[in-house]
């Protein structure tokens, strides 16, 4: 999973600690600060944050926009 966020985004600031905790627990989540890499945002097609991209076989299979709870994120990871 790829977690796209920016430091200026209020929903991102509430969601980032959840993502960090899940990463510490071993879940495969890559964090990308789109405020620092706008070109990557364009390549991924992300226009708003926070966004979660579920990647399978090198392709985006599902995308979720907006803040999510820990339970919702785990559901996406286990889908």
Image: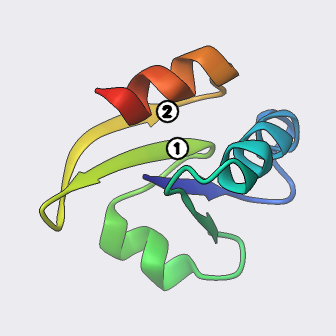
Residue identifier under label 2: 65
**Callout 1 secondary element:** strand
Residue identifier under label 1: 51
- Give the vertical position of 5 relative to 14 (above or below): below
Q: Which residue corresponds to the image point at 79% horizontal and 33% vertical from the top-left?
A: 11
Mark 2 to mark 1 CA distance (whole Å): 5 Å
Q: Quadrant of residue 38?
A: bottom right
Seen from the viewer's position, the closer of residues 7 and 28 is 28
- Badge 1, how many Cα within 10 Å: few under 14, some, many 20+? many
Q: Which mark is residue 66?
A: none
Left or right: 59 in relation to 20:
left
**Callout 2 secondary element:** strand
**Dots 2 and 1: beta carbons under 8 Å?**
yes
Left or right: 45 in relation to 58:
right
Left or right: 5 in relation to 47:
right
Q: Quadrant of residue 55?
A: bottom left
| Upstream in sequence: badge 2 or badge 1 | 1
Residue 71 on image: x %, y %: 60, 16
Left or right: 73 in relation to 34:
left
The quadrant of the image that shows the C terminus is top left
- Total label count? 2
Residue 78 on image: x %, y %: 36, 29
Seen from the viewer's position, the closer of residues 76 and 13 is 76
Q: Which residue corresponds to the image point at 71% horizontal and 71% vertical from the top-left?
A: 35
- Give the vertical position of 61 relative to 3 (above or below): above
């Amino acid at each position: 999973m790829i977690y796209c966020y920016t430091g200026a985004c209020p929903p991102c600031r509430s969601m980032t600690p959840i993502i960090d905790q899940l990463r510490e627990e071993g879940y495969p989540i890559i964090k990308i600060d789109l405020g620092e890499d706008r070109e990557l945002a364009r390549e991924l097609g992300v226009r708003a944050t926070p966004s979660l991209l579920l990647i399978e076989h090198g392709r985006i299979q599902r995308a979720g926009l907006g803040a999510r709870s820990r339970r919702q994120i785990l559901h996406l990871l286990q889908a």
